[in-house]
Amino acid sequence: MNETKLIADLEEINRHVDNDKKLPGAKNIYLAAGWFSDTQELLLKDAFIQLSANPTIAHIHVPLLHQYGGMALGDANSEPDFEWGAMTYKADIKAIDNSDLTVAIFEAEDADTGTAMELGYSVASNTPVVSVFSGNIDQHPINLMLSFGTDAHVTSTAELANYDFFDITPNKYMGKLI
């Protein structure tokens, strides 16, 4: 994991977004996702790419790009202090409050607890949630609090490019539960 490189990659992707193709009324989203494993990094990056291409999405708030003091939790900040933790938490909560919806990315094999909390806060604050449950959800069942806490879900980040965020239709979770 290299959070500095991941941040640079996300910023580079963002520079190439064609805002002229965005539809009127396009949504602002909070992208909840871990970046603590190679798979989580890839999922976050791909979700960002796919959502950036979606004409129903105007702005994507990625918490990693807005960490307190510009310092992400990772190799360079492996033991954050109280101030950093409190301010990063408050910024994330405010960003969810300011978003039209949350997109939560979960790796079935290793669901990130921070992403789970962001999903829970979104549900509690009546912010719609669309989740991606990536991986083998039968071999690695999703916790029922995550699967039922989402308004709709998809099984790959690729589906986010064409998902209609103007019409979030609830769908039935089809994987195994724990």
Image: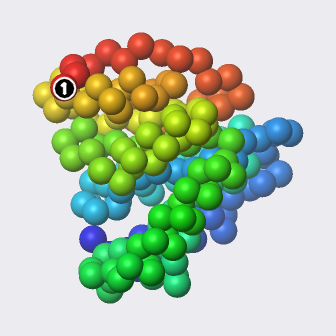
Determine whether the residue tagged by mark 1 lies in a helix, strand or loop.
Answer: loop
Quarter placement of the C terminus: top left
Question: What is the total number of numbered labels drawn onto the structure image?
Answer: 1
Circle 1 crowding by C-alpha within 10 Å: few under 14, some 14–19, many from 20: few
* Amino acid type at mark 1: Ile
In the rendered view, tell whether residue 155 sits above or below residue 171: below
> Residue 50: x percent and y percent?
54, 46
* Residue found at x 51% / y 25%: 151
In the rendered view, tell whether residue 61 sits above or below residue 136: below
> Residue 17: x percent and y percent?
68, 58
Quarter placement of the N terminus: bottom left
Locate residue 101: give its quadrant.
top right
> Residue 75: x percent and y percent?
28, 81
In the rendered view, tell whether residue 51 sits above or below residue 144: below
* Residue found at x 62% / y 24%: 168
Q: How is the image coloured?
A: rainbow
Please indicate whether residue 60 sits to the left or right of residue 38 in the image: right
* Residue found at x 27% / y 45%: 111
In the image, 33 versus 17, the foreground residue is 33
Q: Is residue 75 visible?
A: no
In the rendered view, tell whether residue 23 sits above or below residue 65: above
> Residue 109: x percent and y percent?
19, 42
In the image, 40 versus 158, the foreground residue is 40
Q: Which residue is mark 1?
A: 178
Q: Is residue 38 visible?
A: yes
Please indicate whether residue 62 sits to the left or right of residue 17 in the image: left
Q: Residue furthest left?
A: 139
* Residue found at x 25% / y 31%: 143
Please indicate whether residue 126 sits to the left or right of residue 117 in the image: right
